[in-house]
Amino acid sequence: MVESMAPAVFMAGFGFAAVAATLMVTLRMWQGWLDLKRAELDRRAPPQGEERVEIAELRARVKQLEAIAACVDL
């Protein structure tokens, strides 16, 4: 009976090793994808000082457009 279980134990061990290897590779790929997305976000995000300047410029443009809509010369 022990001799007949040897192939089954071997196949179970091989299957477990294959699943473990697949999970390790998948986890490594997931971490790489997250690192890539973090790098993209860091590249896209402007520094805080530039962001404030952009907001101030947008507010000035809105005021100019409101003045034009109200027919007021600046």
Image (cartoon, rainbow, N blue to C red):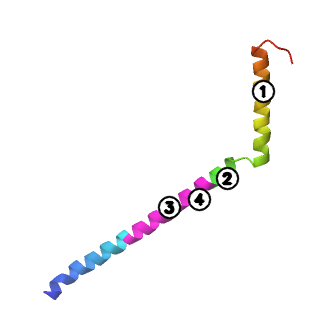
Q: Is there a contact, CB below 8 Å, between mark 2 and mark 4?
A: no
Q: Which residue is mark 1?
A: 61
Closer to the camera in the image, 2 or 50: 50
- Marks 3 and 1: which is nearer the front? 1
Instruction: Residue type at mark 4: give it.
Output: Asp
Instruction: Tell me how far mark 3 sits from mark 1, CA to CA.
Output: 45 Å
Q: Earlier in the sequence, mark 1 or mark 2?
A: 2
Residue at x 36% of width, y 74% of height = 17
Q: Earlier in the sequence, mark 1 or mark 4?
A: 4
Farthest residue, direction bottom: 2
Per the picture, the main secondary structure of the magenta-coloured stretch is helix
Q: Secondary structure at mark 3?
A: helix
Which segment is the magenta one?
A: 20-38
Q: Secondary structure at mark 4?
A: helix
Q: Is there a contact, CB below 8 Å, between mark 3 and mark 2?
A: no
Q: Which residue is mark 4?
A: 35
Q: Residues within 10 Å of mark 3 (few under 14, many from 20)?
A: few
Quadrant position of residue 39: bottom right
Give the percent coordinates (x, y) of residue 14.
31, 75
- Marks 3 and 2: which is nearer the front? 2
In what quadrant of the picture does the C terminus appear? top right
Give the percent coordinates (x, y) of residue 54.
77, 38
Q: Secondary structure at mark 2?
A: helix
Instruction: Residue type at mark 1: give it.
Output: Arg
Q: Which residue is mark 3?
A: 29
Q: Is there a contact, CB below 8 Å, between mark 4 and mark 3?
A: no
